[in-house]
Image: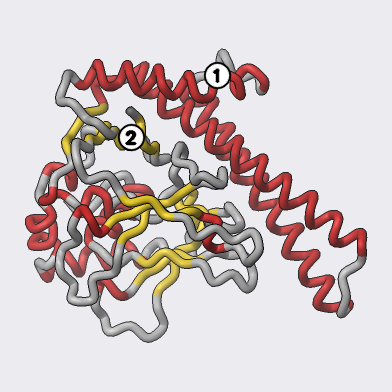
Amino acid sequence: MLDAIFNIGTIIISEFVRTATIEIVRYAIHEIHQRVSKWQNEHNYTNSNTRSYNKASKDVINELEIIDSEFVELERKVNFDGYSSRQDEERKEELELLRSEKFSEYQKLKSMEIADEQCVSPENFETSQLKSDKTHILQFHMGQVVLDKKCSCGRPMILQSKQRLDGSICQLNDFFWACTGFYNNPPVQCKNTQQFTTKDVGLLHRSNIFEFQVSSQDLSIIFNDTSIQKSIVSRIKYHIKEKDDDILCPIHNVPMILREKRNHSGVALDMFFLACPHFGCQQIVKLKSPAQLAAYLRRREGRGIL
């Protein structure tokens, strides 16, 4: 069964049974279409294709940014006036509802884009069984929008991992799903989590992600080569202040911006993070593993670190 869909096209499959990739692709396409068919008909996207889904999802991201800009202006007005009028509060409620609706629309569009691409070009995808020596594959997806993983409260969930302060390689049982409602203030805050299933888990993913073809330890060894690490840092610095459409703030649903820490030690895994552009928002995604740096470069340049 489909457990989660990441917006870069990777699908996590629980109760995974090794079978032909084409059969997995057919199953995934059927499941995705089943889950969004009602919404698709309501929004007249039944005859769309990958390109139109992609354009539509980008348009929705732009709309989310416009919504957030108006919200920020309202907050500034309240701070300047020293009070919040009834009209301001009503408009904020309208914007929050619109934000939620648009994010839901974005999720459906990305899901259909992925399903359509898999249907047209199944040869571009392959399956892998998730094993303890390849936990970096999960790290590769940290912070990314999860399209089809809902908390019991109805909000989307994101992939998280326990922090390993000793720098050792993460194990499968370090990962878990967390509700994005955790970042809301009481009484609407939700602290629900789900343990990541570590048994019989498979992945349907693009076949040209070379980082998935090596072990976590091998990727770490490659990353620690001085010349390779220097090249990685240089490439990432080129994108400072650029927005990342695949990493959205869990509160404001807008693309996060690449930043460089002001006081870092020069260590590549402690230099970069993605931050929400919404004024006053503290949400960040640290790029703290070789896999996350590889994922960022692939999203921005089409090629990771291998």
N-terminal of the pair, mark 1 or mark 2, is 2
How far across and how far down the image is residue 261, in percent? 40, 78
Is residue 107 toward the left or the right of residue 123 in the image? right
- Residue 130, image x, y percentages: 18, 41
| Residue 125 pos. (x, y %) | 25, 27
Q: Quadrant of the N terminus?
A: top left
Under tag 1, what secondary structure?
Answer: helix
- The amino acid pointed to by label 1 is Ser
Q: Is residue 169 left or right of residue 10?
A: left
Q: Classify 101 as above or below 178.
A: above
Q: Residue at x 56, y 36 (%)?
A: 57
Q: Looking at the rendered structure, which numbered label has been put on residue 11?
A: 2
Res 227 label: none
Task: Look at the picture and state if 160 lies above or below 137.
Answer: below
Query: What sort of colour scheme is used for the picture?
Result: secondary structure
Alpha carbons under labels 1 and 2: distance apart = 19 Å
Q: Quadrant of residue 75?
A: bottom right
Residue depicted at x 83% and y 72%: 78
| Label pair 1/2, CB-CB below 8 angstroms | no
Answer left or right for 167 relative to 1: left
Between residue 66 and residue 253, name the one nearer to us.
Answer: 253
Mark 2 burial class by Cα count in 10 Å: few <14, some 14-19, many 20+: many
Local secondary structure at mark 2: strand
Q: Which residue is mark 1?
A: 37
- The quadrant holding residue 272 is bottom left
Q: Residue 291: where, in percent of width, then height?
A: 24, 56
Amino acid type of the residue that numbered disc 2 sits on in the rendered structure:
Ile
Q: Residue furthest right?
A: 86
Q: Name above or below for residue 159 compared with residue 265.
A: above
Q: Residue at x 33, y 83 (%)?
A: 264
In the image, is residue 134 above or below residue 290? above
Count the labels in the image.
2
